[in-house]
Structures are given as C-alpha cells and as structure tokens.
Amino acid sequence: MRKLIGWMLLPLLAVGCAKPTGFNYLGVKNFKVLKFGLKESTVGADAEFYNPNKYPVTMKGAAVDVYVNNNFFGKTTLDSTIEIPQKDTFLLPVVLKVNMNNTAMGLLQTLSSGSDSVFIKLDGSTKIGRGGLFINYPIRYEGMQKIRF
C-alpha cells in the first residue's frame, strides 16, 4: 500500500520540483539621476518584470551589465533576497554608477535632440528558486526603450 501511495505522489513531487522559468522584462520606470558628476554619475530606475511561474519564487542576488546604444553604460548588482509573487508583475530597484565618458554624453545628446528612445541591452545572471533550491538563470534582453525623466 505504501508503494502505491509513493508512486501516486511521484507526479506531484515532479511538478513541485519543476525548474522555474525566467522573468519577462517589461521596461524601465521612474528613471532619475540620483547624483550628477563630471566624471561619475549615479542613475536610478525601477525595472519592471513579470513572473510567469505558477508559484512564487525567490530571487537571490543579480549582476547585470547595461548597454545603451550598444555601448557599455554601467553595471548594477543586487545583493538582497526578494520574494516574487506568482503570475504577477514586480519592480526591481536598479542603481547604476555611470562613468561620464563618451557613452553617457552620447546618451544625453540623444535625449536632448528630442528622441526619447534608446537601444537597451541587458546581460547578466541571477539565482532564482524556491524551497531552498536555486539555479543560476541568465538575464538577457535587447530592445528599444522609451526613457522618461
């Protein structure tokens, strides 16, 4: 009888331990310059994502390189643990230290010329999981993004 119950619970266990899928990137909100300097500036924003999983997941740490118009713009890291609700959107606070070289100046020129869209590329990784089991998951995105101050 115990073996029969064990075999009947096996599919539930397999579904419960299913590998979580990655998040869908929706865009950037609340873009702001936190500190402006001639050599280095600090930029903040909220990145909006959607969790397509049928269960809540936990995200531990992230490191993402940000490229704007195919030029390296900065690197952001997240060293905290965040609980992400199931089938819901969520915001991640992003803080970038930007070297004010030609890349940042080029972005400022693009935005000052009247264009409010730039090409954004994200490349990095994070750990997502549940129940104490975590996997490394790549973060990859490329696309045009409207930036509003």
Image (spheres, helix red, strand yellow):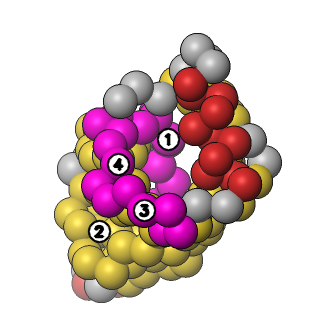
Amino acid on which disc 4 is placed: Val
The first of marks 2 and 3 along the sequence is: 3
Pair 3/4: label in front: 3
The first of marks 1 and 4 along the sequence is: 1
Residue drawn at 43 percent across, 74 percent down: 77
| Rendered image quadrant of residue 14 | bottom left
**Observer able to see residue 87:** no
| Residue 149 among magenta residues | no
Label 3, label 4: how many angstroms apart (C-alpha)?
10 Å
Dot 1: what SS? strand
Q: Which residue is mark 1?
A: 25
Disc 2 to disc 1: CB gap under 8 Å: no
Specify the label residue 33 is tagged with. 4
From the top left corner, tell me how far across and down residue 90 is, in percent.
27, 44
Q: Which residue is mark 3?
A: 37
Label 2, label 3: how many angstroms apart (C-alpha)?
36 Å
Relative to 77, say whether 103 is above or below: above
Label 2, label 1: how many angstroms apart (C-alpha)?
17 Å
The first of marks 3 and 1 along the sequence is: 1
Range of residues picked out in magenta: 12-40
